Image (tube, rainbow, N blue to C red):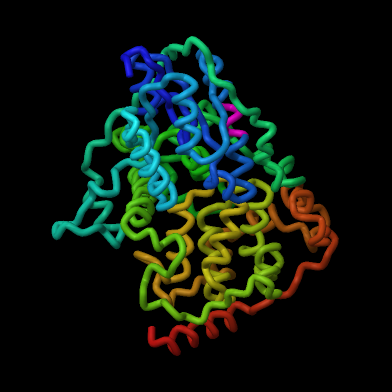
Amino acid sequence: MGETSPILVWMRRDLRLSDHPALHKAAASGRPVIPVFIRDGLVDGLGAAPKWRLGLGLEHFAQRLADKGSRLILRSGDARAVLLELIEQTGAGAVCWMRAYDPDSVERDKAVKAALRERDIDAESLAGHVLFEPWTVETRTGGFYKVYTPFWKAVKGRDVAAPLPAPSEFRAPGTWPDSEALEDWALGAAMRRGASVVRPHVRLGEDAAQARLGAFMAHKVAEYDDTRDLPSVDGTSCLSENLALGEISAAQCWHAGIRAREEGKAGAETFLKELVWRDFAYHLMWHTPRILTENWREEWAGFPWNTDERRAEVKAWKQGRTGIRFVDAGMREMYVTGRMHNRARMIVASYLTKHLLCHWQIGLKWFEDCLIDWDPASNAMGWQWSAGSGPDATPYFRVFNPVTQRDKFDPKRAYVDRWIAEGRRNPGKDALSYFDAIPQHWHMAPGDPYPDPIVPVDEGRKRALDAYENRGF
């Protein structure tokens, strides 16, 4: 193909203009650039909340491109077939994209790259979703890291490329290919009435992500060590929502953290460690993709998890009606905002997998359906860490007591009072919003009595320890 033929930039979880190697390279070539997003089987398989949030992100990103005189072409179908059809229609001579690391995407992308190269189409995948490519971080013996702390020590001194600027302009093709209409995809259909409740809590797009990062570095990072575990305090960056769809890059966050550390802001190093924790999850997903579907620790094979999602205990957990206030507050925060504070996530997950002895896959799938910041690697590692079956996991004998955890991290009950309405004379807006977000067939109302614990804390701990000891742990 000639040097003037268009370049297709296949957009995925990278809905930004700045620090986007694929868009930057395509624009710098001087050739026409055609950004395209493909709704394939992996998109259709997303849970309700992440799919809805993707739709919002695509709409916003399309407008960003339009402001630059470009367009986002939407097509649905098998990615290989769609790209070949677009090449035929546009005369494109190259396709580039940003790498994904989950096994299904890797398999798809390899097949796409092979098909394109068979037809003499330039096909290139580029880094940019993580700080360090998973295959570039090895132990001294050449293996991959299975524990976080040595992983952190191995990468903390590495250089991370400076973020790329957004292209100043994109050369348009002579004729734009047809695009499907985003509204016809109905990506938010499964959210139903919950969409209007969650929407005010969304911080949409690249500008919002950059503003979040700037505000965090200016006002919060210095106290991050002290506030990040307090769910009633606005002490975290909340960037997981934007990182999940690539509305900001990990590298942009990293360099901001480095600057904050150089300025002597106390919590900056901890923030950098959290970014590397995210990378560690991708490192493990790449090297051991079974982490997404199976117990990562082989000795947990055959552990007698409850796998019946129809049990009353599971239903109560999903509904935020366990009778354990810290657990229920976390679940309700998720239904109203689409996110959950990290400390609450640990307590919620520990309670399901240890007090209730339910399989972590039940929780993983529920979060996959409910979180607007859902990320395949972080979600899987978080659940297996909490359950004890994963890499670098909390020990099996460490069973978080959700009551003492509430006393420690929510001593004034501000968090649980914000999210739980039952039994309170004048519950706040957020607590009441929960009842607007949940399915009507749950038949729940603010005036209902708050339930007794479905499994008392001490009883659940004893049951868990007995199960572990019987398995020889």
Residue nearer the viewer, 147 or 36: 36
**Residue displayed at 63% across by 74% down:** 308
The quadrant of the image that shows the N terminus is top left
Residue 161 quadrant: top left
List x then y, in percent, for residue 224: 43, 46
Viewer-closest of 159 and 298 = 298
Tell me which corner region of the image, top left, top right, bottom left or bottom right, holds residue 208: top right
Please give left or right for residue 258 compared with residue 357 in the image. left
Quadrant in which the C terminus is drawn: bottom left
Q: In this rendering, does residue 355 appear at all?
A: no
Residue 73: quadrant of the picture: top right
Image-based side of 416 in relation to 293, left or right? right
Query: How many tags in the picture?
Result: 0
Q: Main secondary structure of the magenta part?
A: helix
The front one of 255 and 17 is 17
**118 inside magenta stretch:** no
Q: Where residue 396 sits: x, y (%)?
A: 42, 76
The residue at the point 51 percent across, 58 percent down is: 343
**Residue 447 against residue 120 in the figure, above or below:** below
| Residue range highlighted in magenta | 56-60
Q: Residue furthest left?
A: 141
The residue that appears at 57% across and 36% down in the rendered structure is 76
